[in-house]
Amino acid sequence: MYKTFYQQSIWQNGMQLLKKIYSLTTKIRVLYISRGEIEETRSHLLVAHQLQFITDQAYFELEKSYNQLCKDLNSYIIDLNKKNINS
């Protein structure tokens, strides 16, 4: 007797792959939002500096940290996108 389509291994394997892709896609979307929030925070940092709420030293140290955070996040997003394409 034939199995239903949903019981066949080819369908089940395809479903596992689809769930993996959806999981990565959702994660990547959240990371894109996080990247936007980093940029928003950086703009607030600049305003705080221009209004002299923080010192030059504090601003440049924080700006350097934000630059590194952006680089790291972008690298992570790129890696996830590669995994998503190669899955």
Image (spheres, rainbow, N blue to C red):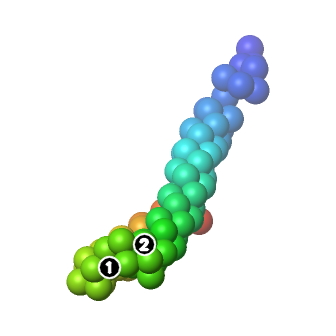
Please give left or right for residue 79 compared with residue 69 in the image: right
Q: Please name the residue shown 37% across and 78% down the image.
A: 52
Whether residue 46 is situated above or below residue 24 in the rendered picture: below
Q: Please name the residue shown 71% across and 25% down the image.
A: 6
Q: Residue furthest top?
A: 1
Nearest the eye: 6 or 43: 43
Q: Please name the residue shown 28% across and 80% down the image.
A: 55
Residue carrying label 2: 48
> Is residue 77 shown to the viewer in this render?
no
**How far from the left and from the top, in percent, is residue 73?**
42, 68
Q: Earlier in the sequence, mark 2 or mark 1?
A: 2
Nearest the eye: 20 or 67: 67
Residue carrying label 1: 59
Please give left or right for residue 30 compared with residue 45 in the image: right
Which image quadrant: the N terminus? top right
Please give left or right for residue 21 compared with residue 6 in the image: left
Distance between mark 2 and mark 1 Cα atoms = 9 Å
Pointer 2 local density, CA inside 10 Å: few below 14, some 14–19, many at least 20: some
